[in-house]
Image (spheres, helix red, strand yellow):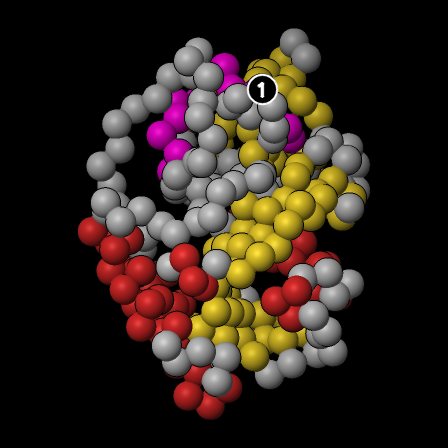
Amino acid sequence: MSQFEQPLREGTIVKRRNRFVMDVLLDDEVVACHCPVTGRIGDLVFHGVPCLVSPADGTNRATRFTVEAISIDDTQWIGIHQGRVNDWVAHLLSLNALPVFSSSERIEREPLVARSRLDFKVDGLYMEVKMPLTELFVTPLPRFERRAVTRPVETERLIRHLEALIATLPEAGRAVLLYVFLYDAPVFTGNPNRRHDALIRQLIREAIRNGLEVWQVNGRVSPDGITLLRCFETTASQ
C-alpha cells in the first residue's frame, strides 16, 4: 500500500461550486475543498455524495482540503485525484510492481517529446498515463442525481500526447499507454458511441501495429492509502 501522509477524512459533497471547488460537509461545517478534476466526473450532480478529503499541504492554499475520492454505490471509493496518480505509478515502478515493466532500472518523469511532456521514460521506453473520469464504470445508487451529457470525452491535449507517444515508436519499437483507475474498473476500451473517442481508438489501433501496448491498472483507495488491485494488458481489447 502507498500510504497517505495523514489519514483521509470522510465528508459529504454539498455541491460542486465550479471547476475547482467543491463544498463539503465535514462534521458540522461546510468547507470549501479543492476539486482535483477540472473536467467532468461522470454524469453526476454533486449533491449528497460521500467523499474522502485530504488536508492541504501548504498554508498558502485557498482551500483547506482536497477531495480525493467519492462513493456512489456504498461499496467502494472511486479515486478522483488525477494529480496523485503519476506519483503512485512512479512508486509502483520503483518497486517493480507493474508487469508492464517487470524490471525498471532508470525512471524519468515528464520527458519532452515533440514539444509535449509525456509522463514517463522507463529504460528508454516512453509511457503515457491517463486516468479516465468522464465516465464512471460504477452504477450509482438511485438516490444520486444524474444529468444528460453531450460533450465529447476526449480532448485535443490527449490527441497531442498520443501523437507524441506514437512518434517514439519508429526508434524505440515499443511504447505504453497506461489507463489508471482508482477503483476496480472493467477492461477499458473507450466509448465507440462518441465520435471523438472513436477517432482516438482508431489512432490507437493503427499504432498497435507498430508496437504500442495498452495496459490498465486498478487500485483501491481507503482512508489510509492506495492499494494495487491488478495490472493487466488490454492491447487485444482495443
**Secondary structure category for the residue under label 1:** loop
Against 4, is 130 above or below?
A: below
* Relative side of 124 to 45, left or right: right
Residue furthest toward the front?
A: 236
Quick one: 94 or 28, which is closer to the camera? 94
Instruction: Quickly name the residue at label 1.
Output: 74
Q: Residue at x 35, y 66 (%)?
A: 204
Image location (x, y in percent) of residue 3: 78, 44
* Residue 129 visible in the picture: no
Confirm whether the magenta stretch covers residue 42.
yes
Q: Residue at x 30, y 60 (%)?
A: 200
Where, quadrant-wise, is the C terminus in this rendering?
bottom left
Confirm whether the magenta stretch covers residue 152.
no
Give the mark count.
1
Image location (x, y in percent) of residue 107: 67, 74
Against 94, is 52 above or below?
A: above
Q: Residue at x 71, y 74 (%)?
A: 104
Quick one: 23 or 39, which is closer to the camera? 39
Tag 1: residue type? Asp
Dominant secondary structure of the magenta stretch? loop
Image location (x, y in percent) of residue 91: 72, 59
Image location (x, y in percent) of residue 44: 39, 26
Bin the neighbour count of mark 1 within 10 Å (Cα to Cα): few under 14, some 14-19, many 20 and up: few
Q: Residue at x 40, y 67 (%)?
A: 161
- Residue 229 in which image quadrant: top right
Magenta segment range? 40-53
* Residue 234 visible in the picture: yes
